[in-house]
Amino acid sequence: MNGGRQGAQAVRNLGGKKCLVTGAGSGIGRATALACADEGARLFLTDINEVGLAETVAAITARGGDVAGSRALDIVDFDAVTEWANEIHDEHGSLDVVMNVAGISAWGTVENLEHRHWKSMVDVNLMGPIHIIESFVPPMVRAGRGGHLVNVSSAAGLLALPWHAAYSASKFGLRGVSEVLRFDLEQHGIDVSLVVPGAVRTPLVGTVEIAGVDRDDPRVRKAVHLFERRAVTPEKVARCIIRGIEKRRFLVYTSPDVRFGYWWARKFALPYEFVMRQANRQFSKFLR
């Protein structure tokens, strides 16, 4: 076996560690990149948004952080990911921490969702992280130094939230990948964290596409406002991610409601099913 646990060790802190963060151009990705920089990590950053990525790099550099490399690319493009990965490995060697943060969202009932919604969710939220894993984790294994893989899923990867079928297809999938890799990579000293945020206050809240729903409907605006009031900041999510790495946690919660909801769903199946049905009926009132 190549690599193995000899010389492998858990990542107890990010100081001096080579860390990759996807989706670094905004939201949770940018907040995580900034937080990692403050911890002393050497960063490799990517995002499909070239302007946003450049702003993140500038912000990190301005505060004395170390961005060893950045590349604007689409993680759906496997060839682009592998090309960049090869360049990084040739120049810097294998990484210590790989963070799959990039993602998109679209909601809707099955009769309103279009094929493009299903495909984009799976392409970006599931195949994108898989491309990153394929390109960056095997060199970590071969290096035999251990490390950490972080995959950002969602509360929708744990619970049957209304209108989230396409989104949950990708996030439940990423959860499954993470649960298997948690044990597959243990022998190589590589820990895995699955981050399951609930509501997060990012620009995505105001732009997420909801198939079959009028975003200008006052009832929808009110619901979005209530969502934003309960949402945590990207900075809090970033702190939770870093603490999860340091504590070697598999499930990383960013708010107590998701932790309680998942516990409740597993322990009390019938009440959980009742609440999900009621929630679905309430959501149906917003349909055109």
Image: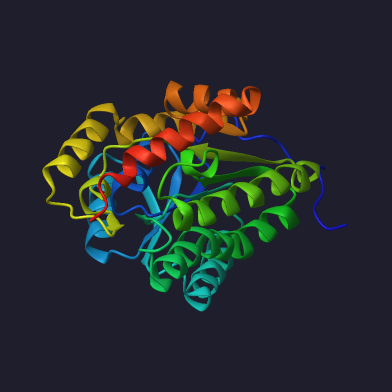
In-front residue for pair 101/187: 101
Scheme of image coloration = rainbow
- Drawn side of residue 201 relative to residue 79, left or right: left
The total of numbered circles placed on residues is: 0
In-front residue for pair 164/23: 164
In-front residue for pair 150/16: 150
On the question of residue 154 being in view, the answer is no
- Drawn side of residue 172 relative to residue 62, left or right: right
Residue 250 image point, x, y percent:
62, 34
Residue 35 image point, x, y percent:
37, 36
* Up-down relation of residue 38 to residue 122 (above or below): above
* Up-down relation of residue 33 to residue 117 (above or below): above
In-front residue for pair 41/125: 125
- Drawn side of residue 32 relative to residue 221, left or right: right
- Drawn side of residue 9 relative to residue 25, left or right: right
Q: Which quarter of the figure is the N terminus placed in?
A: bottom right
Residue found 83% across the figure and 58% down from its top: 2
Residue found 72% across the figure and 48% down from its top: 180
Residue found 28% across the figure and 27% down from its top: 230
* Up-down relation of residue 186 to residue 138 (above or below): above
Residue found 65% across the figure and 52% down from its top: 177
Residue 162 image point, x, y percent:
42, 44
Q: Which quarter of the figure is the C terminus placed in?
A: bottom left
- Point out the residue furthest to the right here: 1
On the question of residue 190 being in view, the answer is yes
Residue 89 image point, x, y percent:
58, 64
Which of the 4 image quadrants contains residue 189? Answer: top right
